Amino acid sequence: MARSVLAGLLLAALALAHQPVSNSTSSSTGSGTGLGEWGPAYAKARAALAKLSKNDKVGIVTGVGWEDGPCVGNTKAVSSIAYPSLCAQDSPLGVRYVEGVTAFPAGIQVGSTWDTSLMYARGNAIGMEAKGVGVNVQLGPVGGPLGKIPEAGRNWEGFSNDPYLSGIAMSETIQGMQAAGVQACAKHFVGNEQELNRQGMSANIDDRTFHELYLWPFADAVRANVASVMCSYNRVNSSWACENPHTLTSVLKEELGFQGYVMSDWNAQQKTTDGAANAGMDMSMPGTDFSGGNILWGQNLLNAIRSGAVAQSRLDDMVTRILAAWYLLGQDSGYPPVTWTSWGDNSGSGAPNVSGTHSTVAREIARDGIVLLMNNNQTLPLNKPKSLALIGQDAIVNPSGPNACGDRGCNTGHLAMGWGSGTDQFPYLVAPYDAIKPQAASDGTTIVTSITDDTTAAASAAAQAETAIVFITADSGEGYITVHNRSSPQR
């Protein structure tokens, strides 16, 4: 049934082939309706809405400010409906800035398994850990960037540049996460295909390409009842993604029937108060810029409602969607509190250890996502070679520790994730040398190492061994970090 719906979507796209994606304001409001499984949650949300003041409502849709709460994103609590300060936390591969959690393989590794059961299991494990430490909204999975540009920066966070595979992985991950009780957030919507100039460039996409490629994974996310969608930093056909009425309202909320809420990427509400609200954005994160200023909603949103620039009904729809997602996941009853902070010297401490046996899932994905491109002369598997050279810095863990570089902002030692906000703290990291050494000892194999990237040393090590394995990396990440004099492209 789900595939037939996608087929209908594709046929609709073909009928509009190569027409630019419109940015005109839709004549419909795009208000949430509470269809399907969302019905009971919407009923609760509407009953709660009636108890709220305008200030309460604005507090629910506006972040409290950068680093002004324990999580990377926080909203105001509303005691009249027992609504907490909502906690939104990175990342797509695990709970960022928190101890006692698992660092799962990146999305690209998961996609390489082609295993829907592992996609679901990873999502479920991430969801269990997020809920266990009190996170309401876990900021993942990633359907954009899809992967148009190989050196774009964040392709490793997503599952595949094939929209069909990406969509399946999005759906399985979201279902797994939300079965555990945490809200998933499908990101980054849409056309966020490069880190270089991401807050200024425009992704210009014709309608057929938009539907067949970039929208496809998000369509699967909506069908999986994803609680939230994050709008991106870039422009889409010259209009900011978080202020684009066509993509947010006409396509996401009306065409796809999305019942959850749209939150901004952090400080992606670029310019206006009423522009984002009227376009269909529902939550402003983190509520300020990264210096604590430029508050576009909050009091400014109240003023816009009083002046008529934003309709009261639009604010009510924002709040209803956010509350409905909260009720949909059952977070109104017995949800764990946040006992830790993302900031300062005590970052991550104070949370319970929630990793359980999830290392098993992580290892299965790491194993099954390996891609063998060629096996000349049946060289693999190795059969107790007399000597083995391990060459390259990637063979070992960073000598300063796997978490030595903030947000993984270096390419030193074994590479297991890129850099940026899509990262997590490693509770441990098994590098190739660590895994091969005990097996070599058991087999009577002598190991020769060259654990730098020096080519002369590498050649010398290889000459001393019967077989050589060379470990190389290509690293990339988010644009706010510069690694080895490179900001967003790969190294």
Image (cartoon, grey):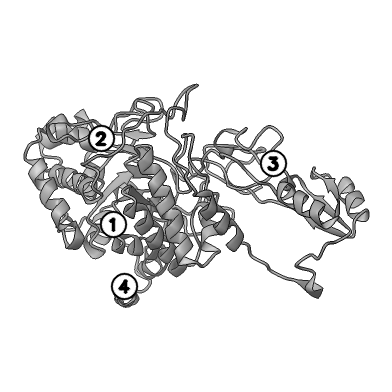
Give percent across and percent down for residue 78.
17, 31
Q: Residue at x 36, y 25 (%)?
A: 292
Q: Say what secondary structure mark 2 lies in.
A: loop
Eye-nearest disc, 4 or 3: 3
**Type of the residue with mark 4:** Ala
- Asked whether residue 327 appears in the rendered view, the answer is yes
Q: Which label was assigned to residue 252?
A: none
Residue assigned mark 3: 397
Residue assigned mark 1: 23
Can you tell which quarter of the image residue 408 is in? top right
Q: Residue at x 21, y 36 (%)?
A: 60
Q: Say what secondary structure mark 3 lies in.
A: loop
Q: Residue at x 58, y 63 (%)?
A: 368
Residue assigned mark 4: 2
Residue assigned mark 2: 62
Give percent across and percent down for residue 27.
15, 58
**Type of the residue with mark 2:** Thr
Q: CA distance from mark 3 to mark 2?
A: 41 Å
Among the two numbered marks 4 and 2 on one chain, the one whose residue lies closer to the N terminus: 4
**Type of the residue with mark 1:** Asn
